[in-house]
Amino acid sequence: MIWILVVVAIAGLAVIAGFAAERRCLRSERRRLQQTVSELRTQLAADADSERARSEFMATASHELRSPLTSIKGFAELLMSGPYASSIPPRQLEFVEIIGRSADRLVQLVDELLEVARLNSDQIAVEPRPVDIGEAIRETAELMSARIAGKHQHLGIYVAPTLPAAMADANRIRQVIGNLLTNAHLYTPEGGRIHIGAEADRAWVRIVVADSGIGMTAEETEHVFERFYRAPGRTGGVPGTGLGLAIVKSLVDLQGGEVLVASRPGRGSAFEVRIPAAPAIADTSGELLRGRRILIVEEDPAIAALIADQLSSLDVETAVVHDADSALDALAGERFDAVTSDVRIGTSDGIELMRLIRADHELQSVPAVFVTVDVQQPGLAGEWTVSKPIDADKLRAALIAAIRSGRPRVLAIGRPEVQRRLEPALDDLGIEYEWETTGSAAVRVSGERRFEVALVDVGLRNPEAVLQALKLRGRRLRSAVILFSDGAAPVSAALTDQGVEIVPIDRAADAVLSTLRGSPRQEVITRDGVSGVR
């Protein structure tokens, strides 16, 4: 009996000793893991600070480069196509054209730098409008022709004769095409073939860039759109950062399109981009501007002169001032049909200038367009904007819209209980909006006045009838109607069956802001009422 007790005691001591050793190992492992986690956190914080500093530098550098590039590009265009072109000798005109093309490439480089900064901070924006994809392809191919010829590559171009315009950002879609052509050029050996084509595909415009280059494996194609990804073993001697195709994917997604890739090692690659086709648009030839008087508020005299010259072909009479006080004096002493203003005007603020103008009973109806570098500033929500470098067509279109429609307005239609919840968020945006609590009143108002966006409560009685009867007559080329839900009111089967996009009420103001800026909206409410991403 005693021996049994001794054996049991020894076994118990062994178990206890084992437990103690295991606890020591666990404590040691926990300390090691805590140390590893601490080191990782420190490294992540350092990486985040470094990335933020790099992004801030790129954004600042890009911003400072844009102003002088605006003058170089704008005046080169005036010399090439303005009233001075006929008086310039052919050889000198060639030099001017080279300056123009070089300025375009510098603008593209600056945009790339800014694009990377915005990619890192998820602040990429697009300005959709009808774009001639065939023209974009031919222009991009011409810019790359020397590089392609340098490698004795053959470039084939096909544009369908009846190709419709695409609903895209003109500069961004050129960037997409340029990045894809550059990628094909870099990864295709000397004497290889590159093809770029565009054709209609139902409601899409389809762009294909194919090459006879080195190709990729199936595994590599899975990662090809990831940032900084470069296929191992296939990048020797090929310059690049691994950002070009990632930027392509981001820009195509933002324009409501999609991009696909097919590739085989040694057999080349084919990238396919689909962009929505543009609907028919109203005439924006500029006749509405003819004979108008425009006040230009711009700190830089060269850019002010450029804006005036871009409008001179329409017999627009312009006056230029360089600060807010002079602008207010000019508006008080003379009549103007519209105002263009930068955000930064000397020591003044263009946004504050507009507040002062709209607070004046005599001036509050004067249409305004902001011409500035950063059109995504919160203070510009609900304003007509044109980004620098200035596109003359966009400038004319914005002025026409401002004169025809006044300041962009939003028509909100919803029950009184949701009005109380949503109005503070709309007030914070600083936009002009009108609220109606019944569908019939909203339909009547939409026929009397112009609105850019309609915000519709799905809890209204028969919201489908409201959607069908609304008449939005702003300059948006697509139906700019946002449906929102407070989460309590049921969503009709007709709306859910059609897959109509519906945003939660706490995201409705953000959706309005995105629509006014031309960005796509992603959040929806599914049939079961759960928010998600389409």
Image (cartoon, helix red, strand yellow):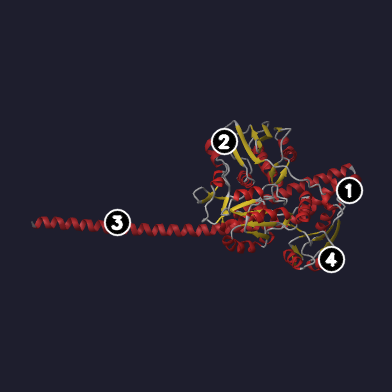
Of callouts 1 and 4, the N-terminal one? 1
Q: Residue at x 15, y 56 (%)?
A: 8
Q: State which mark lies toward you, 1 or 4.
A: 4
Amino acid tagged 3:
Glu
Task: List x then y, in percent, for residue 302.
Answer: 82, 57
Of callouts 2 and 1, the N-terminal one? 1
Tell me the CA gap for discs 3 and 1.
Answer: 88 Å
**For residue 506, side relative to residue 1 (left or right):** right
Q: Secondary structure at mark 2?
A: loop
Q: State which mark lies toward you, 3 or 1.
A: 1
Of callouts 3 and 1, the N-terminal one? 3
Q: Is residue 417 above or below residue 85?
A: below
Tell me the CA gap for discs 2 and 4.
Answer: 63 Å
Q: State which mark lies toward you, 2 or 4.
A: 4
Residue beneath disc 1: 83
Q: Which mark is residue 491?
A: none
Q: Residues within 10 Å of mark 1 (few under 14, many from 20)?
A: few
In the rendered image, which quarter contains the N terminus?
Answer: bottom left
Residue beneath disc 4: 330
Q: Are marks 3 and 1 in contact (CB under 8 Å)?
A: no
Q: State which mark lies toward you, 3 or 4.
A: 4
Residue beneath disc 3: 22
Amino acid tagged 2:
Met
Of callouts 3 and 4, the N-terminal one? 3
Q: Which mark is residue 216?
A: 2
Q: Secondary structure at mark 3?
A: helix
